[in-house]
Image (tube, rainbow, N blue to C red):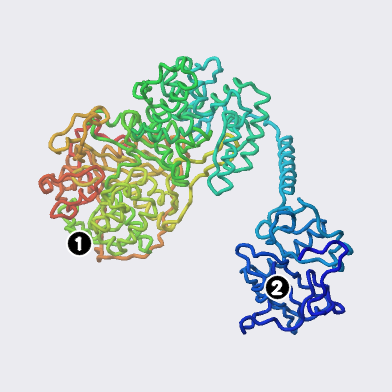
C-alpha cells in the first residue's frame, strides 16, 4: 500500500481499537491488544517490532511510557534475503508489558538487536521530522530500507497535520551518513568539522605556550668558568706550592686558523645542515621527544649550535631532562640569530673535549698528532671529528689496543666529506686509518722525580673517594695533599747518601706519619717515577720481623698486666702447629721482664706472651692499627689481611714478625704508641675543592679510633724507649729529644726495619733486596741503576735474596732513620712522652730470681765482641740471619731445592726447617762484628 499523502487519514486501527487515554499513538498502525499470535503452536516471546513487520498492538501504554514504533509493511514482492509478508505476519511479536512496567524484548527474526530496530525507527522519524523521507521510499528504491517504513496517517504527529511538517519528500532527500542517526561504531566518531576545530584550538594553545616560553628564555650572558681551563691542581700540604697541574689547557684558535678539511669533517659527522639550519634540527628533536614519551632514553639530536650553547655558556646544565633540552633549544635558536655561523664554530671548536686531556681543537692537534692545528690534514681532521662523540670511551678502548670504534667514525667522516664535496675530498676516499701517524703519548713532566710517586698514591686514594682521573683532567679541582716538600727531598737525599755504594737491587723505603691525624707527611719509594714506577713505601709487603713485637706487648698491657711481669727467657720453645723457635743466644736468659725482653728482642718471651693473651687478641690490635691491609692485594695471601694470614698459616710465628706489612703501615701502626692509644688510618689527601664553586668535593678521611688504652700506650713507650737507650736500636738516639722505636730483621737478613717516633712524628725505614731472574729462575738479569731489568724482557721472575749482614735492623735502616729524623724534627718543640702509668698487675709466667742480676752495660754493637754471645751479631737482635738462631754465624737454613721467595711472599719466607718458620727471631739483625758497609758507625751513637 502506498504511503498516505499529506492530510489523508491512515488506516483504521487493526482491531478497531482507538488509542487509549494516556497512550501514545502508534506510528504506522494501531497496536493490537492481547497475547502474541502463536506460530506453529509454539508461543514466541515478546519482541520489539522490526522493519518490515506489522506492528502489533499490545496492552495500553502506561503513563510516561514510550510507544512501540512499528508500522504496517507495504505490500510487494519479497526482496532477496527478506521474509515473505505471510511469514512476517506469522513471526511478528508483541511487546509485552510486565507488572512492573518493564517490557520484554526479543531479537527480530533477522538476528538483529531489538535496540537496532528501535534506532532505525527513531532515525526514520527524525528524517521525517526534518522534511525528508525514509531511505527506500524514493523512486527506484526497493522496499527494503535501512529503517522501518511505516505508513503515516494524518493524525500522527509526523503527518502533515503534526508538528513534524509535511510528510514525504522529493528525490535526494535521503538521510546523510554523518547525521546523528548513524548506526554502530560510526555514531561514536565525531564529525570531521569538530575534529578540525579541536585540532586548531589545541595547536593554537601549544604554539602560544611555546611562544611565551621562547620569549621568556634569555640567552645566557655568563661564560662557563672552565671554558679556558678545566685542569686540576695538586698542592703540597702548604696549600700554595703545586705538585702538578693536570689536564690540558686549551690553545684558543680562530676559525681562519682551522683548515677547511677539519671544519668540514666536524660538520659532516656532527651536523650536516649546520650552514643552513636555524640552530636546531626539528626532525631530530621530534625523534628525541618521541623516544622520551614512549619510555626510551632521552636522546640527543643536538646540533653544533646546541652543543656549543651548553658547553660554552653558564646556566645551561648538562643533565639529561626534557626541561633542559627545551631551554637549550630556545637558546640555540636565539644564538643562531645573534651570532654568525663562523662565530658559533669558533666557540664550539675551542670548547669541545677530544680526549687525552685535550680541550679544544688546538690542544687536540698537539695531543694526537704533535702539530699545530693549521697543519692538520683532512684525514686527521676526520679522526678528530670522530672522537667528539665519546672521547673518554675512545681513550679507554685505544689504550687497550682496540681502534675499531675510532676507525669506524673516521671512515664515516671521510665518506660524508667525499659525498658533500667530491672535488675537494675525492682524493681522500681511499685514505686508510692505518696511515695516520699519531704522536706518542708523552708522560707529563709532572710525573718526573718524586712527583710521580706522590701523584700515584694520591690518584689511588681519590679513586676510592669517587674522583676519577678523567674528573681531575676536566672538572677543575684543587687537591690539597699531606706531603711536605722539604721532608720528601730530605728522605731522598738521606737514603741516597746511605745506600750509594750498595747493589742497585737493594732498596730502601721510608714513610713518615703524623700520629695525631694519620697524615703521610713524607715518604721515599725511589728517585724517579718515570724510570722506576714501583711505589714501594705503599705497595711492597715485607715481613715485619721483630718490629711487630710491640703489638704483642700492647696486647699484654691491654689485658691489665704490667711491664714488670717476669717471663722465662728460655733459649728454645715448642708450640702447637709451629716448629721450634729459638733465641739468638744459645744460653737461656732465665726470668726476664717484658721491658727487658723487648729491649733485647727475646723471641721466646713474646711467644709465651702471645700464647697467654691469645693470637686473636694480638691480631686484633695490629689490624686496628692498620697493619697488613696491603697484603690483601697480593694473590699470595688469598685476599686475607697479612696478620690474619700469618695467624692462620704460621701460628705463633706471628708473635715474632711473620706478618707482611708496608712501610706506611708500620709508621701508621706505631701511632697508637705515640698518640695515647688512638689511631687514624693513614691518608694522603686533606681535601678536594671545586675551583668553580669553592665547595669541598671530598673532605679529609680521618676517623679516629681508640685501639688500646692511654695507660697501655704509655707503658709500651717506656719499653720502646729502652730499645733506643740500651737495646738493639741505640743508633737511633740523637740527644735530648725523646725517641722510641724497634728494630727488626727477618730470615737470612732479607728484610730489615727500624720503626721509631717522637711525640710528633712516626717514621718507618725498611730495606730489602729484590733480584730479577729469567723465567727459568736460574740466571740473574742485568739491572739498571734503579734495580730494574730491560723492559723488553718477558717472563721476569723476582727473588728476594739476603742483604749484606751489616744491613740488619740496627744497622743501615736505623742510621737512615736517625739522619732523616734529626733533620726534619730540628725545628720541632722538644716534647716528652707521657709518664708510665704503672697500672698493670704483675703476671709472672716464671718465678723471678730473688735478686735479679743487674742489666749489663750495653757495649758498642759495632765491635767484634759486641756482647751478643757470638761475636758477629747485633746485640740480642741478631743470630736469626743464619737460620739456627745460635748467633754464631753457623749453619744456613735448609730449603727444598728450587724453592725461592717472590717479593712480599711472607709464607715462603717461613718455610725453612721442615715446613715451619725458621727457628729464630724474625726481628734479629745480622751484622758483622767489624762492619764493612759504606758507613759502619751510627751517627749520634751514645758513648
Q: Earlier in the sequence, mark 2 or mark 1?
A: 2
Give the secondary structure at mark 1.
Answer: loop
Residue 577 circle label: 1
Q: From the top left corner, tell me how far across and down residue 409 is, in percent.
A: 43, 30
Q: Nearer the viewer, residue 426 or 731?
A: 426
Q: Quadrant of residue 146?
A: bottom right
* In the image, residue 623 above or below residue 489: below
**Which quarter of the picture shows residue 736?**
top left
Q: Secondary structure at mark 2?
A: loop
Q: Is residue 597 visible?
A: yes
Q: Is residue 517 above or below residue 773?
A: below
Name the residue carrying label 2.
48
Residue density around tag 2, few if under 14, some if 14–19, many if 20 or more, within 10 Å: many
The x and y percentages for residue 668 are 39, 47
- The spot of residue 898 in percent (x, y) is 12, 44
Residue 245 can be seen in this image: no
Q: Position of residue 59 (x, y in %)?
A: 77, 81
**Spatial CA span between label 2 and label 1:** 104 Å
Q: Nearer the viewer, residue 330 or 374?
A: 330
Other-residue count near label 1 (Cα within 10 Å), few / some / many at <14 / 14–19 / ≥20: few
- Name above or below for residue 377 compared with residue 106: above
Instruction: Classify residue 322 as left or right of residue 353.
Output: right
Which residue shows up at 34% across the image and 28% down it? 530
Which quadrant of the rendered structure holds the N terminus? Answer: bottom right
Nearer to the camera, 268 or 90: 90
Amino acid at each position: 500500500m502506498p504511503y498516505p499523502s499529506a492530510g489523508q487519514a491512515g488506516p483504521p486501527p487493526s482491531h478497531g481499537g482507538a488509542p487509549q487515554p494516556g497512550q501514545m499513538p502508534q506510528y504506522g498502525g494501531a497496536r493490537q491488544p492481547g497475547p502474541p499470535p502463536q506460530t506453529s503452536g509454539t508461543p514466541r516471546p515478546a519482541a520489539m517490532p522490526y522493519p518490515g513487520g506489522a506492528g502489533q498492538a499490545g496492552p495500553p501504554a502506561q503513563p510516561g511510557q514510550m510507544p512501540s514504533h512499528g508500522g504496517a509493511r507495504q505490500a510487494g514482492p519479497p526482496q532477496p534475503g527478506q521474509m515473505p509478508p505471510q511469514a512476517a505476519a506469522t513471526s511478528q511479536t508483541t511487546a509485552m508489558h510486565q507488572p512492573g512496567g518493564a517490557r520484554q524484548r526479543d531479537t527480530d527474526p533477522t538476528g538483529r538487536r531489538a535496540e537496532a530496530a528501535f534506532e532505525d525507527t527513531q532515525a526514520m522519524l527524525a528524517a521525517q521530522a526534518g522534511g525528508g523521507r525514509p531511505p527506500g521510499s524514493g523512486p527506484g528504491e526497493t522496499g527494503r530500507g535501512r529503517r522501518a517504513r511505516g505508513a503515516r496517517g494524518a493524525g500522527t504527529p509526523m503527518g502533515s497535520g503534526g508538528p513534524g511538517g509535511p510528510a514525504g519528500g522529493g528525490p535526494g532527500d535521503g538521510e546523510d551518513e554523518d547525521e546523528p542517526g548513524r548506526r554502530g561504531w560510526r555514531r561514536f566518531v565525531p564529525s570531521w568539522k569538530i575534529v578540525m576545530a579541536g585540532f586548531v584550538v589545541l595547536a593554537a594553545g601549544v604554539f602560544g605556550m611555546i611562544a611565551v616560553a621562547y620569549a621568556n628564555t634569555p640567552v645566557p650572558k655568563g661564560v662557563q668558568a672552565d671554558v679556558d681551563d678545566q685542569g686540576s691542581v695538586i698542592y703540597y700540604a702548604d696549600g700554595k706550592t703545586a705538585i702538578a697541574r693536570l689536564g690540558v689547557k686549551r690553545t684558543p684558535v680562530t676559525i681562519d686558523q682551522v683548515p677547511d678539511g677539519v671544519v668540514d669533517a666536524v660538520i659532516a659527522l656532527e651536523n650536516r645542515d649546520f650552514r643552513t639550519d636555524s640552530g636546531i634540527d626539528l626532525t631530530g628533536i621530534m625523534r628525541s621527544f618521541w623516544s622520551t614519551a614512549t619510555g626510551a632514553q632521552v636522546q640527543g639530536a643536538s646540533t653544533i649550535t646546541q652543543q656549543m650553547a651548553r658547553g660554552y655558556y653558564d646556566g645551561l646544565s648538562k643533565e639529561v631532562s626534557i626541561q633542559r633540552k627545551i631551554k637549550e633549544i630556545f637558546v640555540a635558536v636565539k644564538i643562531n640569530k645573534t651570532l654568525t655561523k663562523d662565530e658559533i664554530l669558533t666557540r664550539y671548536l675551542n670548547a669541545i673535549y677530544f680526549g687525552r686531556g685535550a680541550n679544544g681543537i688546538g690542544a687536540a692537534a698537539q695531543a694526537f698528532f704533535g702539530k699545530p692545528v693549521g697543519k692538520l690534514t683532512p684525514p686527521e681532521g676526520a679522526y678528530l671529528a670522530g672522537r667528539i662523540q665519546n672521547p673518554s670511551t675512545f681513550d679507554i678502548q685505544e689504550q687497550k689496543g682496540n681502534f675499531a670504534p675510532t676507525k669506524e667514525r673516521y671512515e664515516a667522516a671521510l665518506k660524508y666529506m667525499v659525498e658533500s664535496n667530491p672535488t675537494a675530498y675525492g682524493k681522500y676516499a681511499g685514505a686508510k686509518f692505518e696511515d695516520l701517524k699519531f704522536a706518542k703519548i708523552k708522560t707529563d713532566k709532572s710525573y718526573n722525580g718524586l712527583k710521580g710517586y706522590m701523584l700515584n698514591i694520591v690518584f689511588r686514594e681519590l679513586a676510592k673517594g669517587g674522583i676519577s682521573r678523567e674528573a681531575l683532567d676536566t672538572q677543575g679541582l684543587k687537591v690539597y695533599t699531606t706531603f711536605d716538600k722539604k721532608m720528601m727531598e730530605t728522605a731522598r737525599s738521606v737514603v741516597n747518601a746511605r745506600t750509594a755504594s750498595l747493589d742497585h737491587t737493594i732498596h730502601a723505603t721510608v714513610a713518615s706519619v703524623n700520629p695525631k691525624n694519620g697524615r703521610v707527611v713524607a715518604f721515599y719509594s725511589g728517585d724517579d717515577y718515570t724510570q722506576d714506577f714501583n711505589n714501594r713505601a705503599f705497595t711492597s709487603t715485607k715481613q715485619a720481623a721483630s718490629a711487630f713485637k710491640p703489638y704483642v706487648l700492647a696486647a699484654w698491657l691491654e689485658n691489665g698486666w704490667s711491664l714488670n711481669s717476669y717471663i722465662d727467657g728460655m733459649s728454645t720453645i715448642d708450640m702447637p702447629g709451629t716448629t721450634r723457635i729459638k733465641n739468638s743466644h744459645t744460653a737461656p736468659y732465665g726470668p726476664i721482664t717484658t721491658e727487658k725482653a723487648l729491649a733485647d728482642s727475646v723471641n721466646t718471651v713474646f711467644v709465651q706472651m702471645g700464647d697467654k693473651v691469645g693470637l686473636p687478641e694480638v691480631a686484633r690490635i695490629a689490624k686496628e692499627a692498620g697493619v697488613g691491609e696491603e697484603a690483601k692485594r697480593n694473590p699470595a695471601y688469598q685476599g686475607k689481611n697479612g696478620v690474619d694470614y700469618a695467624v692462620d698459616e704460621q701460628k705463633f710465628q706471628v708473635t715474632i714478625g711473620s706478618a707482611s706489612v708496608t712501610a706506611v703501615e708500620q709508621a701508621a701502626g706505631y701511632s697508637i704508641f705515640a698518640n695515647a692509644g688512638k689511631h687514624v688510618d693513614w691518608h694522603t689527601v686533606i681535601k678536594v675543592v671545586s675551583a668553580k664553586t669553592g665547595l669541598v668535593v671530598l673532605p679529609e678521611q680521618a676517623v679516629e679510633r681508640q685501639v688500646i688504652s692511654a695507660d697501655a700506650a704509655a707503658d709500651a713507650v717506656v719499653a720502646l724507649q729502652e730499645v733506643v737507650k740500651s737495646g738493639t736500636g741505640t743508633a737511633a738516639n740523637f740527644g735530648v729529644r725523646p725517641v722510641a722505636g724497634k728494630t727488626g730483621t727477618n730470615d737470612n737478613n732479607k728484610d730489615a726495619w727500624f720503626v721509631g717516633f717522637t711525640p710528633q712524628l712516626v717514621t718507618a725505614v725498611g730495606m730489602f733486596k729484590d733480584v730479577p731472574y729469567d723465567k727459568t729462575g736460574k740466571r740473574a738479569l742485568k739491572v739498571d741503576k734503579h734495580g730494574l731489568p730491560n723492559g723488553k724482557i718477558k717472563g721476569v721472575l723476582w727473588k728476594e735474596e739476603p742483604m749484606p749482614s751489616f744491613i740488619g735492623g740496627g744497622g743501615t735502616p736505623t742510621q737512615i732513620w736517625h739522619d732523616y729524623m734529626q733533620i726534619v724534627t730540628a725545628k720541632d718543640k722538644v716534647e716528652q712522652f707521657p709518664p708510665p702509668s704503672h697500672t698493670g698487675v704483675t703476671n709472672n709466667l716464671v718465678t723471678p730470681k730473688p735478686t735479679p742480676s743487674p742489666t749489663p752495660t750495653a757495649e758498642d754493637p759495632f765491635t767484634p765482641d759486641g756482647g751478643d754471645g757470638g761475636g758477629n751479631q747485633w746485640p740480642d737482635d741478631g743470630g736469626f740471619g743464619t737460620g739456627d738462631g745460635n748467633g754464631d754465624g753457623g749453619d744456613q737454613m735448609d730449603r727444598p731445592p728450587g724453592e725461592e721467595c717472590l717479593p712480599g711472599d711472607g709464607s715462603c719466607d717461613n718455610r725453612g726447617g721442615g715446613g715451619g718458620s725458621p727457628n729464630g727471631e724474625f726481628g734479629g739483625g745480622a751484622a758483622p762484628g767489624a762492619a764493612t758497609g759504606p758507613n759502619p758507625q751510627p751517627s749520634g751513637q751514645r758513648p
